[in-house]
Each structure stands twice: as C-alpha cells, then as structure tokens.
Image (cartoon, helix red, strand yellow):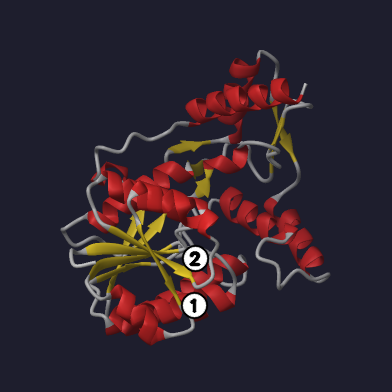
C-alpha cells in the first residue's frame, strides 16, 4: 500500500472488523494483519469493505515490520492470555517501532484497570503489565477504556434473567456502571486512530452510566412486567467465591467463570469507575444508551423466538 494506512491486528474478530469498517467509512486506508492460513471466509467481509488483507507470520518481527511500513497507526484488538497480550502483541509492538509507526493502540478496551489492585483481575493485570513495555518502546500510545461491553446484557445474559424478572448484582444496586456497545467502542477507536492530532495516553468513554436499579426500571417499562434488582451478596463474598473457584483451575482458559466474576467485583466495588469521560472528543459519534440497546435487544430476542416457534 503506497498511501498511508492504519494497520489492525485482530481484524477478524467482532471489534476488529468494526474498527476496520469505521476507518473505511472515515476515508482511511486499512490493512488487516491476519495469521497465515486464515480461511478466506473469515476475511471476505473485510475485503468486500475495501480493507487490504495481509496474511503474515506473527512469530516474525521482521515480517510484521515489513507489513507495517508506511502505517500511521497500529490498532491491536487481539484477545487472549499471556501468550497473546504479551508475546504476540509484544512482537507487533516491536515491529511497529522497527517500521517507525508513529502510534500504537493496545488491546485494552475494558474497565479502568489503572485503578484496580494487581491480582484482582487476571486479564486486566496482563494489560496493565503490557503498559510498561509500551513505555520502554518510546512509541506514542493511547489506551481506550470503555467500561463493560453493553452487548453482554443481550442474549442469555448472566445479569438479566427475563424469566424471573431479575437483574442480579453484588454490593449496592445503586452503584453506577460504565457500559459501552462494541459498535460505539469501534467507532471511537477508529476516530482515535484516524486523528491527525496527538491523543492522550488514556481515553475513557461510556455509552451510558447506569445502576442496576435503572436497568431494572428500563426493562420493566419495555417488557410490561416487573423487573427487580436481585442481590447476590457483598463484593467481599464474591471475592471469596472467586478464590475458591480459581483453586479448581481455569488458568489456561481465556474466560473461566471466575474471570467474569472478577470483572463483576471490579465494577460493583466502584474501584474501576471511569472518570472523567472523554466522550465529547469526537462529537460525530452517537452514543447508544441502555434504553435503546435493551429495546433493540428485545426486538432481536422476539424475532429469534418467532423464528424458532
């Protein structure tokens, strides 16, 4: 690619694909770095959108650097454990430095783990530890923190029980939670990657900031039946349960049950709250609020039920 472009690693995933499409929508050339041997069926939608798909050996810094030459920014949406977040993403970072890419956006996209205590969330610890490597690299980097993905409230959500009309929580039902849809997160990430101006090291966003009480009220209005907050215990009790479950294994799993519980503890303790928010940095982004998301989710759920009936 002769023209400047943004490179994306992890572009075959949901978030990565959306970031690529948002960049194309902004008129930015995009190169998707995919593993050699990736099935064409996984990259076809990217190609159809105008993205240049580049199969590359992710074990080779030299090969990665060759593909990154001319890039204005590298966006990582890679997901995994130590071998991905540190090893593979680390090679991507080294290649970006070697190719003299000006900026790097690491695969953070989560709660504000700059405030969490090490050891309380394995997956967030991996991302925080990677920041030391970013600092040593000398590259300009921006971490985008979006709270919890609002999309996790859809489908068979562990938080909203439609049959029983309950919204589960730990700690306080009034604790404010930061929630952002994957499409909104992708749109913001694309705006940051395409921004010709320097961007801060940390950008914090939330499509909506709501409590369980408010989520229950929205569901009550939408569904026409009562939804109530359902207390599952204190944050401290949840932390004890996490230690017990973790003792039985799951360290090699990306998202074992106790990992999800760690996110829940971080959110409901309030320690990982995002503030201040940087939503207004790109005023063209229209943020999805919880009532709009749950309304759309209700439509999807009813359409699925009518299809299976």
Q: Nearer the viewer, residue 284 or 67?
A: 67
- Compared with 108, 95 (above or below) is below
Give me the C-alpha separation between circle 1 and circle 2. Answer: 9 Å
Q: Is residue 118 left or right of residue 52?
A: right
Q: Residue lying furthest right in this view?
A: 248
Question: Regarding mark 1 in the picture, which secondary structure is present there?
Answer: helix
Q: Nearer the viewer, residue 24 or 82?
A: 24
Q: Residue lying furthest top in this view?
A: 224
Q: Quadrant of residue 284?
A: top left
- Compared with 55, 264 (above or below) is above
Q: Quadrant of residue 296?
A: top right
Within 10 angstroms of label 1, few (less than 14), some, or many (20 or more) residues? some
State the residue at coordinates (46%, 79%). Answer: 57
Q: Is residue 29 left or right of residue 206?
A: left
State the residue at coordinates (33%, 46%). Answer: 22
Label ID, residue 88? 1
Question: Regarding mark 2 in the picture, which secondary structure is present there?
Answer: loop
Q: Quadrant of the N terminus?
A: bottom left
State the residue at coordinates (66%, 13%). Answer: 224
Q: Position of residue 294 (x, y in %)?
A: 56, 28
Whether residue 117 is visible: no
Q: Position of residue 56 (x, y in %)?
A: 43, 75
Asked if labels 2 and 1 touch by Cβ distance under 8 angstroms, the answer is yes
- Compared with 189, 176 (above or below) is above
Q: Nearer the viewer, residue 53 or 239?
A: 53
Label ID, residue 267? none
Q: Position of residue 186 (x, y in %)?
A: 40, 49
Label ID, residue 78? 2
Within 10 angstroms of label 2, few (less than 14), some, or many (20 or more) residues? many
State the residue at coordinates (61%, 24%). Answer: 298
């Amino acid at each position: 690619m002769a023209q400047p472009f943004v490179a994306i690693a992890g572009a075959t995933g949901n978030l990565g694909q959306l970031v690529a499409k948002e960049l194309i929508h902004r008129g930015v050339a995009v190169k998707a770095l995919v593993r050699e041997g990736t099935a064409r069926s996984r990259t076809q939608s990217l190609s159809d959108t105008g993205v240049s798909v580049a199969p590359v050996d992710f074990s080779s810094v030299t090969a990665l650097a060759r593909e990154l030459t001319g890039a204005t920014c590298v966006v990582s949406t890679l997901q995994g454990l130590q071998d991905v977040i540190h090893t593979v993403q680390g090679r991507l970072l080294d290649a970006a430095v070697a190719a003299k890419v000006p900026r790097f956006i690491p695969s953070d996209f989560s709660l504000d783990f700059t405030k969490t205590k090490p050891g309380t969330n394995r997956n967030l610890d991996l991302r925080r530890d990677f920041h030391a490597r970013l600092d040593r690299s000398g590259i300009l980097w921006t971490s985008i923190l979006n709270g919890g993905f609002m999309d996790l409230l859809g489908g068979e959500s562990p938080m909203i029980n439609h049959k029983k009309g309950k919204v589960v929580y730990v700690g306080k039902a009034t604790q404010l939670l930061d929630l952002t849809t994957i499409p909104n997160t992708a749109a913001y990430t694309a705006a940051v990657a395409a921004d010709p101006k320097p961007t801060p090291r940390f950008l914090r966003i939330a499509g909506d900031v709501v409590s369980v009480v408010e989520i229950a009220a929205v569901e009550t209005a939408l569904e026409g039946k009562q939804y109530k907050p359902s207390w599952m215990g204190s944050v401290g009790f949840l932390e004890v349960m996490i230690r017990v479950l973790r003792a039985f294994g799951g360290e090699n799993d990306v998202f074992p049950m106790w990992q999800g519980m760690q996110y829940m503890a971080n959110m409901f303790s309030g320690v990982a709250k995002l503030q201040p928010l940087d939503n207004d940095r790109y005023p063209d982004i229209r943020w999805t609020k919880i009532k709009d998301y749950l309304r759309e989710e209700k439509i999807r759920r009813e359409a699925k039920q009518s299809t299976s009936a």
